[in-house]
Image (cartoon, rainbow, N blue to C red):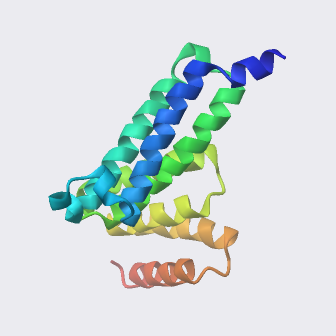
Amino acid sequence: METDKKENNPMFRFKIDIAKRKKEEGTEIFKGENLENHIPPDKHEKKLDYAIGRWRQALKMVLEIGSTPAFQEPQYQEQLDELKVALNLNLSMAYLKWDRAAEVLPDVVTCCGNVLALQPKNVKAFYRRAQAHEALEDLESAKKDLLEAKSLEPNDAAIKKSFERVEARIAKGE
């Protein structure tokens, strides 16, 4: 049962649990849950900054764990990839809502690209990357991503609306 030993590697479990805890803290902060446990009362209006910070910390940890030679085996990489997808999607969503969104739009594109490298049919990644491309005035890339999203979720109203808006902007020559 060599596989069982590897999956239960205490150092891997320890490190991955810390990364998961950071991810969960970021999610709680983002949702406004248990803020008193995570950030000072006078900083509650900056909860998005704190959520992004937790998710960035967690992603950094996951990337460090994944680069450790002892954890290159598939059973570790599957768990790490799962976390990479979730964290990159969380970050892309938060970046789009952030008051500094204009500064981090390229990061949204990168985060979504990271997700699509692991899950090539991830609708959220296509949709969020399209939003970033549109905001960056790269309408052709936005249209391409929205077409992909639309092919995966043909009945999604938000995707349809965004696609129509981008097509209209392209037709106007924007």
Picture quadrant where residue 13 is located: top right
Location of residue 101 in the rendering, given as x and y in whole percent from the top left corner? 27, 62
Total count of labels = 0
Location of residue 127 in the rendering, given as x and y in whole percent from the top left corner? 52, 66
Left-right relation of 167 to 78: left
The residue located at (15%, 60%) in the rendering is 42
The residue located at (44%, 56%) in the rendering is 27
Left-right relation of 34 to 2: left
Q: Is residue 137 above or below residue 116?
A: below
Left-right relation of 82 to 47: right
The residue located at (68%, 21%) in the rendering is 73
Name the quadrant of the N terminus. top right
Location of residue 167 in the rendering, given as x and y in whole percent from the top left corner? 48, 80
Residue toward you, 135 or 92:
92
Name the quadrant of the C terminus. bottom left
The residue located at (37%, 61%) in the rendering is 30
Pick out the residue farthest to the right.
1
Residue toward you, 146 or 90:
90
Q: Is residue 28 above or below residue 164?
A: above
Pick out the residue farthest to the left.
42
Residue 138 in sight: no
Residue 108 in sight: yes
Residue toward you, 117 or 81:
81
Location of residue 103 in the rendering, given as x and y in whole percent from the top left corner? 23, 56
